[in-house]
Image: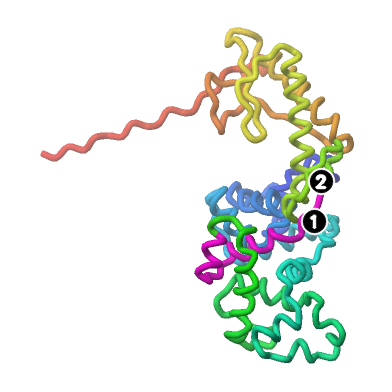
Amino acid sequence: MAAAVNAGKDLHTLVAARVMGKKRSEVTDDERAKAKPINFGKPGGMGDATMRQYAKTSYGILLTDAEVAALSAAWFELFPEMQEFLADASDAPKELAELLKLTPASHYSHTDDRRFIDHPENECRELKPHPILGAMLIKSMKTANPRTEAGRLYSDDDLDYFWSRLAAKKELLPKTAKAAVQRREPSPRLQRAVLSLVGRAGVFTLTGRLRADATYSARHNTVFQGLAADGAKLGLWLLWRADYRIVNFIHDEVMVEVPVNSNLKQHAERIKKLMINGMQAVVLDVKVDVSYAAAERWYKGAKAVFDKSKTKLLPWSPAPKPRSRKQTVT
């Protein structure tokens, strides 16, 4: 990924081109837009179902299961190092079994089913948390009709066991998840809430900041988003020390106020250099770039506009909306 960035390649276009089997120059804006949720969500460990919802809510893009699968496959082909990055040493089923005391003995006591307590591999381990029971609970929290790998429905006794064990720890869950456990209403959202109870660990940014007790997604996000935040703050500090009036900071955009009759290009180039210097203090081996525009107020779609000589930066403004003609009836 760093090699692609350093080569000046646009990651969204790169992924879209791989999926569509096109040259990068042939990728349309709509095709490029579909790659954005993958590039922004996948490094944080988003699964395909979450990715589809993220694309819809954050970008207004409706992706099919097949499209998400194709985008994910292309992403891992282009950036194979991400397989190792997203690998996780935590064992959610095992940790849930430990938290909820899902043991062969407790399962037998609740269900009168001897298949776990009598299994040869569980001899002398009847009181030990069992990861298979943890995995079954995870599946039970997502759907009302969970099945085994062989396609057999979980028994009512099994489901009652899992709901009862989770209910004993429901105070650890957020309010909405707690209510869902009380009503025994499984859903992907409840499953995510249950999974958030385990798999937590500390993570450091390269600048040395510690984020403690972080979930799987938070840990992976922190590695790059936390570092980007540190670099952005250093850039803002440099702007402030250079006596620039910072009006706002929106996601990855900084708003700086300068006199409209001043040399806007000179200001923009200086601001650009300071922001790059701030980010490069924490990201040493990856190319950092900044684009800019001038406008009398903030516009998400503002672009750099120059005079005919290309030496003077001009304030950008959106194209006026066409007036609608009033229809009259005679």
The disc, 1 or 2, on the residue closer to the chain's N-terminal end is 2
Q: Position of residue 52 (x, y in %)?
A: 60, 59
**Which residue bears the numbered disc 2?**
4
For label 2, the SS is helix
Crowd class of label 1 (few under 14; some 14 to 19; many from 20; radius 10 Å): some
Task: Write the start and end of the magenta stretch as one range.
Answer: 177-203
Where residue 306 sits, quadrant-wise, is top right
In terms of depth relative to the viewer, which is nearer, 273 or 208? Answer: 208
- What residue is rendered at 77% in x and 19% in y? 238
In terms of depth relative to the viewer, which is nearer, 111 or 152? Answer: 111
Q: Amino acid at mark 1?
A: Leu
The answer to whether the residue labelled 1 contacts the one labelled 2, judged by CB atoms less than 8 Å apart, is yes
Q: Is residue 115 magenta?
A: no
- What residue is rendered at 65% in x and 30% in y? 253
**Which residue bears the numbered disc 1?**
78
Seen as rendered, the residue at the extreme right is: 285
Q: Amino acid at mark 2?
A: Ala
For label 1, the SS is helix
In terms of depth relative to the viewer, which is nearer, 58 or 66? Answer: 58
Asked if one can make out residue 27 in the rendered structure from this viewpoint, the answer is no
Q: Is residue 190 magenta?
A: yes
Is 287 rendered above or below residue 116?
above
